[in-house]
């Protein structure tokens, strides 16, 4: 009986490990894979504060740290409504990493255009119109929206994020597994990044 229990616990552990690896492999990221500093942003694509953070922080961080191989950035989905979920699905429909991040930026930039009203069909059409400029065809996007694969992937990531980080609002920013609670101001954010880089001898 004890052997059976041991086998069950081992199988449970392995299944959890495999699930964790799968979730990690599906995270949208940019930057050096083994960078010492990792910035995770949990956001909803319909969230104005998330769009504001992306425009004020991300692009400058990319120039100063990501492109230099010092920081890895991860976009984590935390959709607060169906429109945000569908936008995330369209984002994952694009498999080219460079185009995907360009699309992410444009989705945020055009948020006030597509994330309006309650007609999800119109909202989807608006998102698809934006995404069509980034190498995605309408049939391809419709197929993605109808697939359970992306929806399950996104919602599972949201559930795991809630369990691990106790997220109460979007965006929630995590720098090397610690919540960043500073203002959306690049100079203060940069100092926090630099402080983490100093620990690894990567910044003086």
Image (cartoon, rainbow, N blue to C red):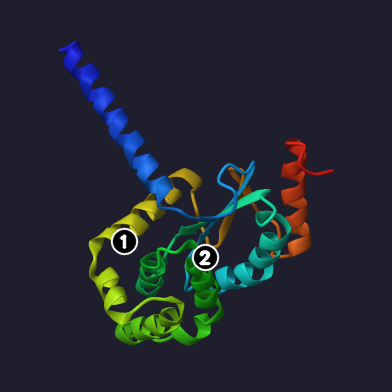
Query: Label 1 crowding class (10 Å Cα cut-off): few <14, some 14-19, many 20+?
Result: many
* Observer-nearest of 197 and 182: 197
Circle 1 residue: 150
* Observer-nearest of 67 and 48: 67
Image vertical order of residue 134 relative to residue 178, above or below: below
* Residue occupying the point 59% across, 48% down: 32
Q: x, y (%) of residue 146?
A: 23, 70
For residue 152, side relative to residue 42 (left or right): left
* Residue occupying the point 61% across, 68% down: 54
Q: x, y (%) of residue 53?
A: 62, 67
Residue farthest to the left, as pictured: 1
Circle 2 residue: 98
Under circle 1, the secondary element is helix
Q: How many marks?
A: 2
The quarter of the picture where the C terminus appears is: top right
Q: x, y (%) of residue 118?
A: 35, 84
The answer to which of marks 2 and 1 sits earlier in the sequence is 2
For residue 49, side relative to residue 91 (left or right): right
Residue farthest to the top, as pictured: 2
Residue 115 visible, this angle: no
Residue farthest to the right, as pictured: 204
Q: Quadrant of residue 8?
A: top left
């Amino acid at each position: 009986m004890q052997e059976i229990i041991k086998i069950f616990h081992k199988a449970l552990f392995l299944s959890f490990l495999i699930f964790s690896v799968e979730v990690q492999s599906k995270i949208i990221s940019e930057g050096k894979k083994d960078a010492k500093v990792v910035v995770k942003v949990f956001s909803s694509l319909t969230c104005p504060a998330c769009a504001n953070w992306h425009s004020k922080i991300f692009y400058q961080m990319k120039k100063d740290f990501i492109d230099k191989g010092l920081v890895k950035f991860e976009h984590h989905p935390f959709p607060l409504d169906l429109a945000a979920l569908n936008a995330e699905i369209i984002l994952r429909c694009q498999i080219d990493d460079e185009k995907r991040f360009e699309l992410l930026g444009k989705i945020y930039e055009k948020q006030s255009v597509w994330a309006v009203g309650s007609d999800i069909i119109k909202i989807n059409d608006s998102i698809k119109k934006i995404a069509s400029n980034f190498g995605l065809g309408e049939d391809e996007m419709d197929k993605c929206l109808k697939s359970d694969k992306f929806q399950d992937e996104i919602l599972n990531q949201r559930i795991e994020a809630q369990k691990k980080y106790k997220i109460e609002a979007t965006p929630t920013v995590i720098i090397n597994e610690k919540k960043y609670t500073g203002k959306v101001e690049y100079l203060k954010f940069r100092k926090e990044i630099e402080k983490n880089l100093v620990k690894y001898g990567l910044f003086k």
